Image: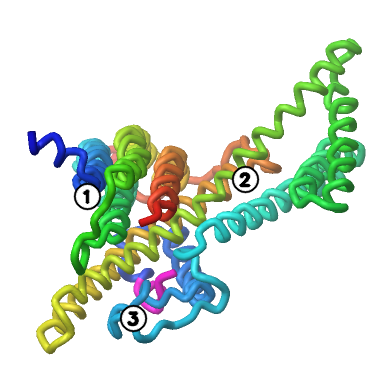
Amino acid sequence: MEWISSLFNGNVLAMIGAALAVFLAGSGSAKGVGLVGEAAAGLVTEDPGKFGQTLLLQALPGTQGIYGLLTAFVILNKIGVVGGPMKELTTMQGFLFLASALPIGIVGYFSAIAQGRAAAAGVGIVAKRPEELAKGITFAAMVETYAVLALLASILMVFGIKI
Amino acid sequence: MLSLFTKNAGAPKLLRFGTPTFIVEPIFFGGISTFIWGALFGGWFGNIVEAVTSGTYTIPPIWFNPMEDPMRLLIWSFIFGGIHIFVGMGLKAYMLIRDGKVFDAIFDIGSWYLVLLGLVMLAAGGVIGIIGKYMALAGAITLVLTQGRDQKNIVKRLFSGILSLYNVTGFLSDILSYSRLLALGLATGVIATVINTMGTLFGLDVGGIIIFIIVLIIGTVFNVLINALGAYVHASRLQYVEFFGKFYEGGGKAFEPFKIKTKYTNLNLEDRRKN
């Protein structure tokens, strides 16, 4: 059963970790950004001048996907995939990389959707009171906190792994 | 961390898309600040000198490199956060004293200053730690004795005094919230490093250099945009939630002058003919 032993190969596990960080956080961001886009399109039909402001709100849930990509890059850089031969990892190290990808992957997924909903509600603020845009951004930014904390945890974990 | 010549000059025009001035201006000044911090942390477009010379030359940081020692910057983020929050509390004390409530200022703010400073000094250990221990105790006792002063009943008064000590968790989460300074700083630096690594993948002959310049321009513009947004959003949160929460009392209604709105004028020709 070669595939089982290769499943517990350190390098495979680290790659799965990097993939999870991108795929989970990215799907969340895609969902969140899409959600705000739907709400914003409705407003822009009525008032095309508010495109810039709603675009700002739409960009907010996009950060989780970038955080996920960032974590993946840090992992790939550490195991030497980017620019050079891949280092040989033990199963233990592989699992450590996998674990360090989980915070941004999972928190990124859920926080991006929640942030998308908050930002979509912020589009409502822009519709009626465009001068209160900053408050709408702040409501969405409250959610962003947990994504940043997860990114911090993930990056500190990757930095902490000894190879 | 990224050298922000680009952010200085570019952000106001790039981000404008009808964006109001109150967003563009902070980002503009943020660019100047980022430039200074980039020099302190040794980040010039990430690690561009190292990437181009494949590690032969590096620009040493004036202070230290957070990529090598993230915990040090984490502690500094908390210190900056602590100062920020203490200034906010000081403003609250100022407002109370201005309103003639000197005792409120001493009991509500002064005792918290004692507790929080004491706890920090306790963590430092040694003689300072012992002084800190007694400061924290003195502050905590003052809080227990005074925080229930609105209550008539003695038992209720003591109980709400003890309960007020629970607010220390609030201060803890406020301070921890400043860890985002490290997270965002690392994010900018790591993205820039990634861009440089991708750019140098094709070698540094003539074709490689052209690819490198293209990757660098596109990547850096992306990095600036995404981090300008991040800096704006997170700085707003720290100001509005952590800082303003310490002293600001919102509410009220915006003043709307009694005037005729003359943006559109309906000409009612019927009425005119009658006159």
Percent x, y for residue B49? 35, 82
According to the image, label 1 marks what residue?
A11
* Residue at (81% x, 49% y) in the render: B94
Q: Which mark is residue B55?
A: 3
- Kindly tell me whether residue B272 is visible in this rendering: no
Q: What stretch is highlighted in magenta?
A: B1-10
**Dot 2 crowding, Cα within 10 Å, few <14, some 14–19, many 20+:** many
Q: In which quarter of the image is residue B67?
A: bottom left
Q: What residue type is labelled 3?
A: Gly
| Magenta segment, prevailing SS (helix, strand or loop) | helix
Give the camera-side residue of B218 and B201. Answer: B201
B223 sits left or right of A1 in the view = right
The numbered mark, 3 or 2, whose residue comes first in the sequence reads 3
Observer-nearest residue: B77 or B65?
Answer: B65
Asked whether B6 falls inside the magenta stretch, the response is yes
Q: In this view, does B53 lie above or below A158?
A: below
Whether residue B170 is visible, yes or no, is: yes
Point out residue A32 in the picture as x, y percentages from the top left corner: 27, 38
Q: On the rendered image, what quadrant is the N terminus of chain B found in?
A: bottom left
* Residue at point 33%, 71% (across, down): B13
Left or right of residue B109, residue B61 in this image: left
Asked which secondary structure carries label 3, the reply is loop
Q: What residue type is labelled 2?
A: Ile
Find the distance from the CA under tag 1 to the CA under tag 2.
Answer: 37 Å
**Mark 1 vs 3: CB contact within 8 A:** no
Question: Is residue B232 left or right of B145 when viewed as pictured?
Answer: left
Q: Give the residue pinned by disc 2.
A: B175
